[in-house]
């Protein structure tokens, strides 16, 4: 329906309210967290977005989930509250024990 048709149909009467009342209830998706979230738009160069998407796909998670993890990690680094996984600690220690090429 175009703007003119909508104006003619809904102007001055309860047709819009009736149309809304007749609609079927919609099942909304359940949020994946109990923490309130804020949505923000971020403009990225296409190449950067594609790299982020590839990194998220490789981890089997969504792009916004990966971006949130990176932001949280960066913020944790700023205030020295970072939590490091045991696997990451083991990898770092193993890398230190390998001889370096001279």
Image (tube, helix red, strand yellow):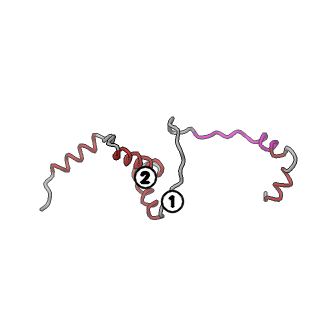
Circle 1 residues within 10 Å: few <14, some 14–19, many ≥20: few
**Chain part drawn in magenta:** 17-29
Q: Nearer the viewer, residue 21 or 59?
A: 21
Residue reaching furthest top?
A: 34
Tag 2 or tag 1, which sits nearer the N-term?
1
Circle 2 residues within 10 Å: few <14, some 14–19, many ≥20: some
Query: Which residue matches tag 1?
Result: 43
Q: Which mark is residue 11?
A: none
Q: State left or right for residue 58 relative to residue 35.
A: left
Mark 1 vs mark 2, CA separation in Å:
18 Å
Residue at (30, 41) in percent of width and height: 85
Residue 46, x across and y down, in percent: 48, 64
Residue 24, x across and y down, in percent: 73, 40
Q: Find out whether residue 28 is within the magenta segment.
A: yes
Give the quarter of the figure containing the C terminus: bottom left
Q: What secondary structure is found at the residue carrying circle 2? A: helix
Q: Quadrant of residue 1?
A: bottom right
Q: Nearer the viewer, residue 8 or 19?
A: 8
Residue at (28, 45) in percent of width and height: 88
Q: Find out whether residue 48 is within the magenta segment.
A: no
Residue reaching furthest front?
A: 79
Residue at (53, 54) in percent of width and height: 41
Name the mark nearer the viewer: 1 or 2.
Answer: 1
Residue at (15, 49) in percent of width and height: 97
Q: What secondary structure is found at the residue carrying circle 1? A: loop
Residue 27, x across and y down, in percent: 64, 39
Q: Which mark is residue 56?
A: 2
């Amino acid at each position: 329906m175009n703007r003119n048709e909508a104006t003619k149909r809904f102007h001055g009467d309860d047709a819009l309210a009736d149309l809304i009342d007749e609609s079927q209830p919609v099942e909304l998706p359940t949020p994946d967290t109990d923490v309130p979230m804020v949505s923000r738009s971020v403009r990225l160069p296409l190449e950067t977005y594609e790299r982020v998407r590839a990194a998220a796909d490789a981890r089997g998670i969504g792009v916004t989930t990966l971006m949130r993890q990176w932001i949280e990690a960066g913020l944790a680094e700023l205030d020295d509250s970072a939590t490091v996984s045991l696997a990451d600690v083991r990898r770092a220690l193993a890398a230190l024990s390998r001889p370096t090429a001279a």
